[in-house]
Image: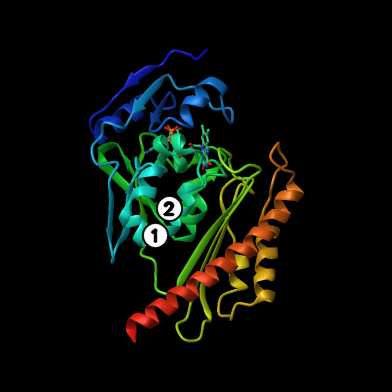
């Protein structure tokens, strides 16, 4: 049984923001509904079922994907994970986003689930978050009166089920900066089964190498599902920056990443198990990111010669 609610289907962003503000605290945005609809039946993190449901799928342009080499990739909030997987632009320029999207839910879920909904649901295990944070992505939030603000994805997560959205605000787009030459990245999702499973541990890693020397000039490590929010670990990144990456410093960074987490024990795994899995996957992700950064270097050198 679910409680009655009033359904709204605004045709513009300003109308949607007005409704959201008017029913403040009693309304929720409906995107793909894959988090929201189950929540109506089961409840979640103590959240109450909304009295007003505001479907944003009839608002034009929220499902657009655009890319330029200078400003990077822009994803409308309603872009679904299967749209990402099928986009030639994303396949060519951000293959990591195709990899990450392919690990979400099932084909049916990916046909409905939006990237905006994944972030706004603010689950610590949200699969899109670690890689978006590692890529230094931002979200644009639009509020009443078309007032816009931009936040780094890192700042958007405030706690389990809590985001930086203010009353009347809607997440409208996500911007992913261009990927620099000699950057490599990877994401590992540890699950107890192969599909339809949320992450026990998720780890995104990114390294950028100095051309010719192979010295690491940028490193980013982000752990999902092991703290109240996806967790970037600058202390672990610092152990890699300025160094030639080897077994020893990858081990140290992976240990530092695990040490920074605050995992809980639940049905998917104990805190100790999560801690160990962060260490294991962080090292694997960094090794793969390093390998990919080197391949890119080779490709670029080939083109130039
Ligand atoms: C069987 C199953 C498997 C799943 N597997 C995974 C998985 O592997 N990995 C994973 O990360 N998630 C998984 N999920 C969770 C879910 O599918 C994703 O989080 C999905 O991306 C949510 O997007 P949605 O469009 O369906 O959001 P909705 O359910 O429509 O909304 C989610 C929340 O965000 C709010 N919201 C949505 N869009 C906006 C917006 N633009 N602005 C402001 N607020 C907004 C809604 O009000 C709601 O509170 C799974 C869910 C199910 C049911």
Residue 166 visible to the viewer: no
Residue 233 in the image: above or below residue 214: above
Scheme by which the image is coloured:
rainbow
Q: Residue at x 25, y 30 (%)?
A: 15
**Image quarter hosting the C terminus:** bottom left
Q: Quadrant of residue 30?
A: top left
**Which mark is drawn over residue 27?**
none
Mark 1 CB near ligand 1 (8 Å cut): no
> How packed is label 1: few (under 14 Cα within 10 Å), some, or many (20 or more)?
some
Residue 58 in the image: above or below residue 76: above
Q: Nearer the viewer, residue 207 or 262?
A: 207
The answer to the question of whether label 1 and label 2 lie on touching residues, with beta carbons closer than 8 A, is yes
Residue 235, position in %: x, y?
62, 66
Q: Secondary structure at mark 1?
A: loop
Residue 85, position in %: x, y?
39, 49
Determine whether, in the image, residue 33 is placed left or right of residue 66.
Answer: right
Residue 110 in the image: above or below residue 253: above
Q: Residue at x 44, y 34 (%)?
A: 108
State how far apart marks 1 and 2 are (Cα).
7 Å
Residue 263 in the image: above or below residue 177: above
Q: Residue at x 54, y 41 (%)?
A: 123
Residue under pointer 2: 98
Determine whether, in the image, residue 153 is placed left or right of residue 257.
Answer: left
Q: Quadrant of residue 170?
A: top left
Please tell me how many numbered marks the rendered image carries. 2
Q: Quadrant of residue 266?
A: top right
Q: Residue at x 60, y 45 (%)?
A: 199
> How packed is label 2: few (under 14 Cα within 10 Å), some, or many (20 or more)?
some
Residue 130, position in %: x, y?
52, 53
Q: Secondary structure at mark 2?
A: helix
Q: Nearer the viewer, residue 11 or 156?
A: 11
Residue under pointer 1: 94
């Amino acid at each position: 049984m679910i409680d009655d609610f009033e359904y709204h289907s605004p045709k513009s962003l300003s109308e949607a923001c007005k409704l959201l503000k008017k029913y403040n605290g009693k309304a929720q945005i409906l995107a793909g509904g894959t988090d929201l609809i189950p929540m109506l039946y089961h409840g979640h993190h103590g959240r109450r079922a909304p009295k007003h449901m505001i479907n944003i799928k009839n608002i034009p342009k929220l499902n657009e994907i655009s890319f330029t080499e200078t400003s990077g990739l822009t994803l409308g909030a309603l872009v679904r994970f299967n749209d990402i997987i099928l986009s030639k632009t994303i396949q060519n320029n951000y293959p990591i986003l195709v990899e990450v999207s392919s690990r979400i839910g099932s084909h049916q879920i990916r046909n409905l689930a939006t990237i905006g909904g994944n972030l706004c649901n603010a689950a610590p295990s949200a699969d899109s978050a670690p890689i978006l944070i590692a890529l230094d992505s931002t979200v644009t939030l639009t509020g009443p009166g078309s007032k816009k603000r931009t936040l780094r994805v890192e700042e958007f997560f405030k706690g389990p089920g809590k985001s930086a959205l203010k009353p009347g605000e809607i997440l409208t787009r996500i911007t992913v900066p261009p990927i620099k030459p000699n950057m490599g990245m990877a994401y590992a999702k540890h699950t107890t089964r192969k599909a339809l499973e949320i992450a026990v541990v998720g780890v995104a890693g990114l390294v950028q190498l100095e051309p010719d020397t192979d010295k690491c000039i940028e490193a980013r490590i982000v752990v999902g599902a092991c703290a109240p929010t996806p967790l970037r670990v600058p202390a672990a990144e610092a152990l890699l920056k300025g160094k030639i990456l080897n077994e020893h410093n990858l081990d140290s960074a992976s240990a530092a990443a695990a040490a920074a987490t605050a995992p809980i024990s639940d049905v998917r795994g104990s805190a100790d198990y999560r801690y160990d899995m962060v260490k294991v996957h962080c090292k694997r992700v960094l090794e793969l990111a390093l390998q990919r950064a080197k391949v890119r270097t080779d490709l670029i050198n080939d083109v130039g010669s």
